């Protein structure tokens, strides 16, 4: 059976490419998704991607993924990483692996970015590799499903 990976992008990531390019790079979201999809395909998985600026929509998307919509999730919760108990609870509630990714190395940035509410409930975190974080996230998500 083909594994289905959902890549879920949080707030402001729709602006990728023009948003603080020195921090987040010059590729837009579609280009990042294409890189991740290419890796998924090469590993025999299929990828769908979704972005929302709304906490509730991200929570609904996680619930839908956990209810049979996907086998694993690659999640960049963006700013909600550092603030959202509700999103963290959604990650903790679903029974499928969720890999946390960030484009930037959050540990090397402002203090408020050092704490992730998602990290303790994710299978692991990949940060600091730009778009490659998503590619590595897809690999990790597939490995996490296969090792279950
Ligand atoms: C981010 C890091 C977060 O701190 C920030 O709020 C983002 C993007 C990243 O991918 O590096 O929006 O998740």
Image (cartoon, helix red, strand yellow):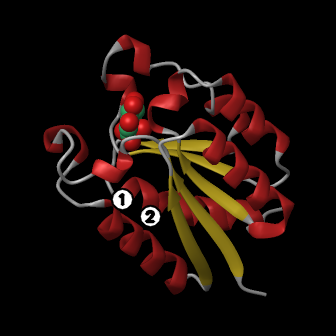
**Which image quadrant: the N terminus?**
bottom right
The verdict on label 1 being within 8 Å of ligand 1 is: no
For image coordinates 18% across by 38% down, the residue present is 20
Judging depth in this view, the residue of 47 and 11 nearest the camera is: 11
Examine the image and state in which quarter residue 107 appears.
top left
In the displayed image of the protein, which residue is found farthest to the top? Answer: 111
Q: Position of residue 110 (x, y in %)?
A: 32, 16
Secondary structure of the residue carrying numbered label 2 = helix
Ligand 1 shown in quarter: top left
On residue 135, the disc is 2
Examine the image and state in which quarter residue 103 appears.
top left
Figure check: 59 above or below 46: above
Q: Is there a contact, CB below 8 Å, between mark 1 and mark 2? A: yes
Q: Is residue 110 left or right of residue 100?
A: left
Q: Is residue 114 left or right of residue 121?
A: left
On residue 132, the disc is 1
């Amino acid at each position: 059976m083909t594994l289905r990976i959902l890549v879920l992008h949080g707030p402001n990531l729709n602006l990728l490419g023009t948003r603080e390019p020195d921090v987040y790079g010059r590729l837009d979201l579609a280009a990042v998704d294409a890189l991740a999809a290419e890796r998924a395909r090469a590993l025999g998985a299929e990828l769908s991607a979704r972005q929302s600026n709304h906490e509730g929509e991200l929570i609904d998307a996680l619930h839908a993924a956990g209810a049979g919509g996907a086998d694993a999730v690659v999640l960049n919760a963006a700013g909600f990483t550092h603030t959202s108990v509700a999103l963290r609870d959604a990650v903790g509630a679903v029974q499928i692996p969720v890999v946390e990714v960030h484009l930037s190395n959050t540990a090397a940035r402002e203090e408020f970015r050092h704490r992730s509410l998602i990290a303790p409930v994710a299978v692991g975190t990949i940060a600091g590799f730009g778009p490659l974080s998503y590619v590595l996230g897809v690999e990790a998500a597939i490995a996490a499903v296969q090792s279950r």
